[in-house]
Amino acid sequence: MSSPPAHRYGRIATLFLTVVLTACASTKASNPQDPFESTNRRIDEFNEKVDEKVLRPVAVGYKNHVPSFLRTGVNNFFGNLRDIWSTVNNGLQAKPMETAETGLRVAVNTVFGIYGLFDVATLAGIQRQNADFGQTMGYWGMPPGPYVVLPLLGPSTVRDTAGWTVDNYYDLWRTEVHSLGLRYGGTALRLVDKRAGFVGMDASLNQVALDKYSFVRDAYLQRRLAATRRKTDDKDDGDDGL
């Protein structure tokens, strides 16, 4: 059987390129950092529906019916686990002061705060210096890449998504808790506790933002830019540990 002529391959390649360019043109975004805006908005709508129907009602019930001292203990405990990974990332960013302070914070809260249930370090004036692997990559010059909205997880970038996989891989709750029931239960509790911290803020956001999607996107990108910016004195602008 004879091979198809070369010009047929050329037509196929041209047709394929046309389809790709048409698809790109149809998803043209107003923000150059958000080339997938059309898809991102659909995922964002899905996330909003899940939050409205499931996560927010559970978080409201948790906040209204669980005693505050228990909620504080849960938040402190998982915050202490996050501080351990922040210590590693501050070290990877060659920030000796932040590394030492975060490491000291972990030691104080683990020993005197009963594995982090009580935030003794903050009372002692030892501040939290949050850092994650996406921030570490950005600190050393890796660009964020396009903005993306992840199903259930929310705002991110290509770089931060890759960083999240590393953060999740080294999550001590996932790696050190071997009972599946306890691991999944604790993960759900951590998620609900985190969502409960934003109860009330979502209503305010809906009131002040004409376009909630754009507002959240721009705020996220600006905050991550600040978190990864290298100053002349190597001081970090800070990050809230999302």
Image: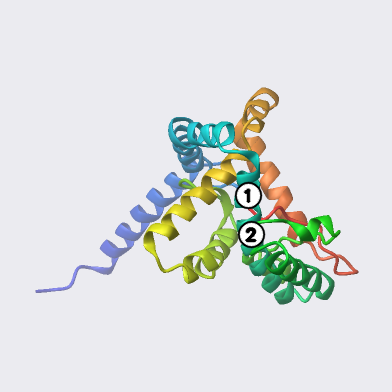
143 or 90, nearer to the observer: 90
> Visible in this render: residue 87?
yes
Amino acid, disc 1: Gln
- C-alpha separation, residue under disc 1 versus residue under disc 2: 9 Å
Q: Is residue 193 above or below residue 241?
A: above
**Which is nearer the eye, 199 or 213?**
199
Specify which label sits upstream in the sequence, 1 or 2: 1
Q: Secondary structure at mark 2?
A: loop
- Say if mark 1 contacts mark 2, CB within 8 Å: yes
Q: Where residue 39 sits: x, y (%)? A: 46, 42
Q: Which residue is mark 2?
A: 144
In terms of image quadrants, where is residue 50? top left
Compared to residue 157, the image places residue 90 above or below, namely: below
Percent of width and height locating residue 138: 69, 65
Q: Which residue corresponds to the image point at 64% horizontal and 59% vertical from the top-left? A: 144
Q: Residue 24 versus residue 184: which sits nearer the camera?
A: 184
Residue lying at 58% horizontally and 52% vertically, measured from the top left? 156
Of the 4 image quadrants, the one containing the N terminus is bottom left
**Left or right of residue 90, residue 150 in this image:** left
Check disc 1: other Cα within 10 Å, few if <14, some if 14-19, many if 20+: some
Tell me what residue is drawn at x 66 percent, y 69 percent: 84
Residue sticking out furthest to the left: 1
- Judge whether residue 141 can be spotted in this image: no
Residue most extreme to the top: 207
Can you give x and y, in whole percent of width and height, for residue 215 in the image?
66, 36
Q: Nearer the viewer, mark 1 or mark 2?
A: 2
Question: Dot 2, crowdedness within 10 Å: few (<14), some or many (≥20)?
Answer: many
Amino acid at dot 2: Pro
Badge 1 marks a residue whose secondary structure is loop
Left or right: residue 200 versus residue 183 is right
Position above or below: 186 against 69: below
Q: Which residue is mark 1?
A: 33
